[in-house]
Image: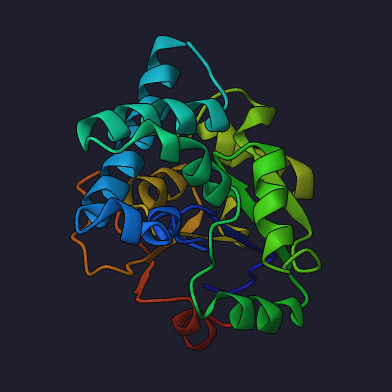
Amino acid sequence: MKNIKAIIFDAYGTLFDVNSAAKKCKDKIGDKWEDFANHWRTTQLEYTWLRSLMKRHKDFWQITEDSLDKSMKAYEIDSSMRNELLDLYKVLSPFSEVPEVLKSLKEKNLKLAILSNGTPYLLNELVNSNNLENIFDDIFSIEEVGIYKPHSRVYDIPIKKYKIQKKEVVFLSSNTWDVSGGGNYGYNSIWVNRNNNIFDNLDYQPKLEIKNLKDLLTNIEI
């Protein structure tokens, strides 16, 4: 991967820990907190795909609420916790290495951006609450095109803004379907495999598999 002009990150699960909201409430939720968190995330993603297919768009925050409501019923979590969990979701914690790596990349002559399903408000809240507001050149939301990843119109957004070629982009995601979506579009897609998962069979193999963002600094020429 040479002649890279932009490094673009997925947000949820890649830079920010989607389970951190439930984890902060684990004393109230109990031992089932992690299963509940995973159910919430899986339902949330399923709703983005289903709504894209049905052409019944809701923004990511509305989907986050809907998927939480279903998951709380499934795991019999008291409805009084709903607002607390939603408030915590707005300020998810970054993975431990993220701030340091992003600051190192900021010193390079590259565009740094987020490309996410999240709404502009949610993404800015995440970035600002974690003191990362001076890192990114752009925070791109799927709301610009009104359809969720992995639709190609989403991956078009940075290309049109920066007027660069697809092969000049490194795209990082922890979600295998997103890695495949970006890779099939033409990005150099890197899989951040934080949980030792198995890659999906979606007609693409990542250019690189890394355990966390630190590995990025030693594996591509910048």
Q: How many marks?
A: 0
Q: Position of residue 4 (x, y in %)?
A: 63, 68
For the point 38% across and 53% down, the residue is 22
For the point 53% across and 54% down, the residue is 10
Going by the picture, which residue comes out furthest to the bottom?
Answer: 218
- Give the left or right position of residue 120, taking residue 58 as reference: right
Q: Position of residue 122 (x, y in %)?
A: 65, 43
Q: Quadrant of residue 53?
A: top left
Examine the rendered structure and indicate whether residue 97 appears above or below residue 123.
below
Q: Position of residue 174 (x, y in %)?
A: 39, 59
> Does the image show residue 197?
yes
Q: Nearer the viewer, residue 75 or 1?
A: 75
Q: Nearer the viewer, residue 189 or 60?
A: 60
For the point 43% across and 35% down, the residue is 80
> Does the image show residue 203?
no
Q: Quadrant of residue 222?
A: bottom right
Examine the rendered structure and indicate whether residue 182 appears above or below residue 168.
above
- Give the left or right position of residue 13, taking residue 134 as reference: left
Which color scheme did the rendering employ for the protein? rainbow
Examine the rendered structure and indicate whether residue 22 appears above or below residue 156.
below
- Give the left or right position of residue 210, taking residue 120 as reference: left
For the point 49% across and 88% down, the residue is 218
Examine the rendered structure and indicate whether residue 20 appears above or below residue 217.
above
- Give the left or right position of residue 221, taking residue 40 as reference: right
Q: Position of residue 93 (x, y in %)?
A: 53, 64
